[in-house]
Structure formats: structure tokens, C-alpha cells
């Protein structure tokens, strides 16, 4: 490892990254961030119900997990919601990004602000608003699967698509509008321009936006908790009820599965998207 | 950018669907809550909209004002601790080699993509009575006692038998959890601000005889101030509105405002009061965002 090799150059005054105490702070911070999660994953393989001391490696809890019907049902619900949320959020996000990128109109600043609202308001406020909304308009409950998940899906789309719009719009910034002009001059209709010129350029943004919507939907707890009923339990809501009950290896195993799914999706997103683009968006 | 009238049909085709969704499934639900906050509760589930301010008046009672104050205080503590921890990390990232920098940033961002609930649950396993910290301390105490027994001070004469620390279900645990969850929110804006910093100022300061600490406090901090303010507000807002962390890590007296709101809707079933509280929380959020926008604008003018 290069980290431990001595650097032969003398340390310059601005080589802060080579100072011991800064390195130590970074190391401690990363330990603080990762140790609990790694501990959780390691102990999901622990062969002891009490989950305190290491008693040997086992995958029993994963087997139990996959045989736990209600947990698997919740997992299926979560994935179904996430898929629908992804499709709708990507389309709505792409349209939002396109409108904001291409057109000038009155009250645009207000419109942009309103689009950012679902991102900035506290989750609890949105959660209770959705709960009251669906209760008041008498949204049908007790529908057959997958329609019983519609309320949660609608709420998920409402907070995911503005995120997708931001990512897609960042991608559109690099689009040369003259290309669209050109296509128009050559006789393409608005729709053709959008489909054949703009969307191909958007593609990395669309994929990144879709993956973002997927992870947002899969991870959401607070808003789902307030919109879900006893029939429509999602994976995080199920884990929550297990966590409230006790700390058991099953919960660790279930959490590990969810972390793994999210990590795979995220790794994919990072590969698809230009790295610099990703980091500047995150900051 | 085109005026929308140049291709009105394309504009409406793209404008209508997201706007519909935003209005129908976000603006209207929020408006509904807003109306509820001016209603009174007339029965177990009945409410009447009579445009009174009783719910807001009730929110100003000492009990709820206290909870608001506590939320603000806990969020402020979280923000302060995050700032102190994140600053050196951000400096280290900025001055690292480009490829190392990418990896460090990735490592800081990665927890964002791990479920909040799972991260909080992971902390329970660390902090609880039989958790990693208590077990680690117990091991230390037992072995220290064993070592001391060689010099005749064993059998708990010098260090008593280990009694587990109560780390979970109190306010400290909540702040610890909030820092754990919100630290990346602080590192990223600080990193962005420090990355833009002109390093020749630092070199000048060091050349002219200021030490590293003096350079830090008289050059780096003032120049990075807009970034610091941004990070402070970005951390403060979600910390103040946290629901899950105080719910899972807090004790009976560590309820934050979001938990009270949640209870009004799930347990106490007093929707108008819960609605008033959520709007007060939202107004506080908007206020913080307005401060941030103001500071960012000043920053933009300064760099031009």
C-alpha cells in the first residue's frame, strides 16, 4: 500500500494531507462512519441468537430470512414500488429538466422553487401530508396487489422526480442547442427533435436519475411509514418493526441484503455517470 | 433559451405532466395540512375548518415550545460537532492527491446511499448495554484488573467491577446518531468551498510568518465562510426535522419536534395540532433556507 510507504520528498508547507494529525482525523472519521455498518454485516453471519459475542460463521439467518414469508413479501413490495417509482420519476424528471432547460416563461423562478420543495421540506411534513391526503380523498384501500401499493408509489414519485430532474438537467447543460436547431431546420418535428436528438444526449443523466429514484424509493422509511397500511408493508417498514422489537441476527441479515442491493445499484450509477459530474452534483 | 410561446405545444406537452404531479400529489396535500392547521378538533375524528389560531397558540405552550427549543438545541449541537469533525476531513481531502481525493470523497458520500434506518440500527448495536462499546470496555477493565492482580491490586481493589454505561436511549445518543447520519452533509459543502480557495493566499500567509493555526483562523475560515454557512444550514435543517434517530435512539425525554408531529397523526389522532406543528417546522426550514440563499448570493457577488 502506498499509504504506508515513506514519501521521500520533504513535506511542503501546504502538504496538509501528509500531516499526521489530519490523516489520523480522516482515519478516525472513516472508522466512525463505517465501523457500525461493518459490524452489522459481520454479525449477520454470527452463529448466536444473542448477537453479542462471535460464535462462528453461519449463513443460517439468511436462510431464515428467505423463508420468512412476510419479510419476503415486504421485500417484493419494496421492489415493485421502486420499479414503478423509477419509471415515472425518470419520465417526469426528464420532462421537468427539459422545460427548465429549454423554455423561458413567466414565474419560472417560482416554478423552480416549487419543484425543489419536495427535496427541502422535512420528510415528516411530507409524510403526514400524504397520509392526510389519501385518507381525506378516500383513496381506495384493500385493492388487490399491486394496486394496494399505489398510494405509496404516488408519494414516492412525488419526492423522487425532482431529484431525477436535477440530475438530468445537469446533464442537459452540456447539450449544444444548435444541434436541436439544426434538426428543426432540417424538418424534424418537436417530438422528433426530443426523441432523436435530446434524449440520446440525456441518456447518462436518465440512467443516473433512474438509479437515484430507485435507491430513494427503496430506502425511504418516514414517508412510507405514514402512507402505508397494515396490508402494505415495505422492507424498511418491516425492518423498523423488527428493530423496535429487538436486535437479532435476522435484522442484521435483512439489513445486509438491503445495503447490498443499494450498493450494487449505486456502483452501477457511478459507473454510468461521469465521476466528476456525480461529485459536483452531490456537493 | 426559447420563449415558451415559440413552440407552445411542445412546452405544454413537457410542462403539464410534472406540474400535474407536483400540484396534485404535493401542493394539494400540503395545502390540506395547511387548512387543517386552522381547524379545530370537534370529535374523535371530526374537525371543522373555522380559521382559528388555537392550534398555533397551543404550539406556543411551554411544553411544545420546550420541545421546539430542544430540537433546535440538539440540531445545533449536531451541527457544531459535525463542523469541528468535518473541517479537518475536508482540508485533508482538498490537499490530497487527485486520485486519493476521488476515493476519499466516495467514501464520505457512500453512507448516504445506505439506508438511514439501517445506519441507526447499526448504532443501536454499538451503543446498547451489551453493545460493542460496553463489551470492549468490559474486556479492558477485566484485563486491566487481571494485570493489576500481579502487583497485588487485583480483585477490583483499584478499578471496580465493570458496570455497563447507559449509552442508549438518552439525548447524547440522539446527538451521536445525528452526527453519524449528517456528517457527510457538512463535509461536502466545506470541501466545495475549500477547493475553490486560492492557495496562494495560504502560501502568502505562511511566508509572511503566520503559523498554521493563525493562517487557518485568519485566512482560511474567512474565505471559506460562505461554504461554512452553507454546510451549517444544510446540516442543521435535516437534523432539526429528524424523526427516526430520536425515535430509535432517544429515551422518553428526547422527543424532537418531528416525533411530536408523528404522534399527533398516528397515536394522539389530533390532526389539526399536528398540522400546525408541521407548518411551524416548515416555516423554520424555509427561514434557514432563506438565510442560506442570502449568504450564497453575497458569495456570488464576491467572486465576480
Image (cartoon, rainbow, N blue to C red):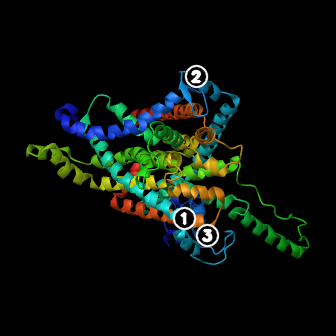
Q: Which residue is mark 1?
A: A254
Of the 4 image quadrants, the one containing the C terminus of chain B is top left
Between the C-alphas of marks 3 and 1, the distance is 12 Å
Q: Position of residue A277 (x, y in %)?
A: 35, 53
- Residue highlighted by disc 3: A43
User: Which residue is labeled 2 in the image?
Assistant: B53
Residue B297 in percent (x, y) is at 42, 33
Residue at disc 3, secondary structure: helix
Which numbered disc, 3 or 1, marks the residue closer to the eye? 1
* Disc 3 to disc 2, C-alpha distance: 52 Å
Q: CA distance from mark 2 to mark 1?
A: 46 Å
Residue for point 50% across, 59% down = A74
How many numbered marks does the figure carry?
3
Picture coordinates of residue B62 (x, y %)? 70, 29
Task: Name the residue: 86% across, 63% down.
Answer: B160
Crowd rating for badge 1 (residues with CA inside 10 Å; few <14, some 14–19, many 20+): many
Q: Nearer the viewer, residue A40 or A258?
A: A258
Can residue B101 be seen in the rendering of this structure? Answer: no
Q: Would residue A60 appear left or right of B295 to someone viewing this image?
A: right
Q: Secondary structure at mark 1?
A: helix
In depth, the one of A237 and A135 nearer the eye is A135
Amino acid at each position: 500500500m502506498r499509504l504506508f510507504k515513506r514519501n521521500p520528498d520533504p513535506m511542503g508547507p501546504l502538504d496538509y494531507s501528509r500531516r499526521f494529525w489530519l490523516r489520523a482525523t480522516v482515519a478516525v472519521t472513516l472508522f466512525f462512519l463505517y465501523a457500525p455498518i461493518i459490524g452489522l454485516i459481520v454479525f449477520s453471519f454470527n452463529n448466536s441468537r444473542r448477537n453479542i459475542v462471535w460464535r462462528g460463521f453461519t449463513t443460517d439467518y439468511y436462510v431464515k430470512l428467505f423463508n420468512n414469508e412476510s419479510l419476503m413479501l415486504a421485500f417484493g413490495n419494496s421492489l415493485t414500488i421502486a420499479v414503478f417509482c423509477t419509471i415515472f420519476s425518470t419520465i417526469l424528471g426528464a420532462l421537468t429538466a427539459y422545460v427548465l432547460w429549454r423554455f423561458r416563461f413567466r414565474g419560472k423562478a417560482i416554478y423552480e422553487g416549487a419543484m425543489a420543495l419536495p427535496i427541502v421540506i422535512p420528510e415528516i411534513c411530507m409524510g403526514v401530508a400524504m397520509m392526510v391526503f389519501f385518507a381525506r380523498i378516500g383513496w381506495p384501500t384493500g385493492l388487490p396487489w399491486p394496486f394496494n401499493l399505489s398510494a405509496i408509489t404516488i408519494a414516492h414519485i412525488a419526492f423522487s422526480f425532482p431529484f431525477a430532474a436535477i440530475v438530468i438537467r445537469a446533464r442537459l447543460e452540456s447539450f449544444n442547442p444548435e444541434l436541436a436547431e439544426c434538426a428543426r431546420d432540417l424538418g424534424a418535428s418537436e417530438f422528433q427533435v426530443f426523441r432523436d436528438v435530446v434524449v440520446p444526449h440525456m441518456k447518462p443523466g436518465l440512467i443516473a436519475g433512474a438509479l437515484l429514484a430507485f435507491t430513494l424509493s427503496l430506502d425511504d422509511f418516514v414517508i412510507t411509514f405514514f402512507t402505508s397500511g397494515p396490508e402494505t408493508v415495505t422492507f424498511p417498514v418491516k425492518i423498523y418493526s423488527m428493530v423496535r422489537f429487538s436486535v437479532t441476527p435476522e435484522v442484521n441479515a435483512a439489513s445486509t441484503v438491503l445495503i447490498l442491493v443499494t450498493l450494487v445499484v449505486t456502483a452501477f450509477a457511478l459507473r454510468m455517470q461521469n465521476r466528476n459530474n456525480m461529485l459536483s452534483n452531490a456537493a | 433559451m426559447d420563449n415558451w410561446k415559440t413552440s407552445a405545444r411542445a412546452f405544454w406537452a413537457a410542462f403539464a405532466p410534472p406540474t400535474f404531479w407536483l400540484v396534485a400529489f404535493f401542493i394539494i396535500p400540503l395545502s390540506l395540512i395547511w387548512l387543517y392547521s386552522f381547524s379545530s378538533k370537534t370529535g374523535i375524528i371530526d374537525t371543522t375548518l373555522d380559521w382559528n389560531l388555537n392550534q398555533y397558540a397551543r404550539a406556543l405552550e411551554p411544553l411544545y415550545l420546550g420541545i421546539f427549543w430542544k430540537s433546535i438545541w440538539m440540531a445545533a449541537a449536531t451541527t457544531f460537532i459535525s463542523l469541528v469533525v468535518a473541517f479537518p476531513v475536508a482540508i485533508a481531502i482538498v490537499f490530497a492527491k487527485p486520485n486519493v481525493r476521488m476515493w476519499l470523497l466516495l467514501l464520505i458520500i457512500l453512507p448516504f446511499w445506505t439506508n438511514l434506518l439501517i445506519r441507526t440500527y447499526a448504532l443501536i448495536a454499538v451503543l446498547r448495554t451489551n453493545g460493542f462499546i460496553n463489551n470492549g470496555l468490559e474486556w479492558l477493565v477485566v484485563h486491566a484488573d487481571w494485570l493489576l492482580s500481579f502487583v497485588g491490586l487485583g480483585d477490583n481493589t483499584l478499578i471496580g467491577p465493570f458496570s455497563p454505561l447507559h449509552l442508549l436511549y438518552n439525548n447524547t445518543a440522539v446527538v451521536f446518531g445525528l452526527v453519524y447520519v449528517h456528517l457527510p452533509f457538512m463535509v461536502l459543502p466545506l470541501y466545495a468551498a475549500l477547493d475553490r480557495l486560492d492557495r496562494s493566499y495560504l502560501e502568502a500567509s505562511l511566508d509572511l510568518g503566520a503559523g498554521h493555526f493563525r493562517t487557518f483562523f485568519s485566512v482560511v475560515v474567512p474565505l471559506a465562510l460562505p461554504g461554512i454557512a452553507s454546510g451549517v444550514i444544510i446540516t442543521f435543517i435535516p437534523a432539526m426535522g429528524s424523526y427516526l434517530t430520536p425515535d430509535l435512539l432517544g429515551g422518553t425525554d428526547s422527543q424532537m419536534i418531528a416525533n411530536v408531529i408523528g404522534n399527533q397523526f398516528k397515536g394522539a389522532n389530533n390532526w389539526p395540532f399536528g398540522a400546525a406543528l408541521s407548518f411551524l417546522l416548515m416555516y423554520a426550514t424555509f427561514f434557514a433556507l432563506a438565510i442560506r440563499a442570502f449568504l450564497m448570493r453575497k458569495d456570488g457577488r464576491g467572486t465576480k
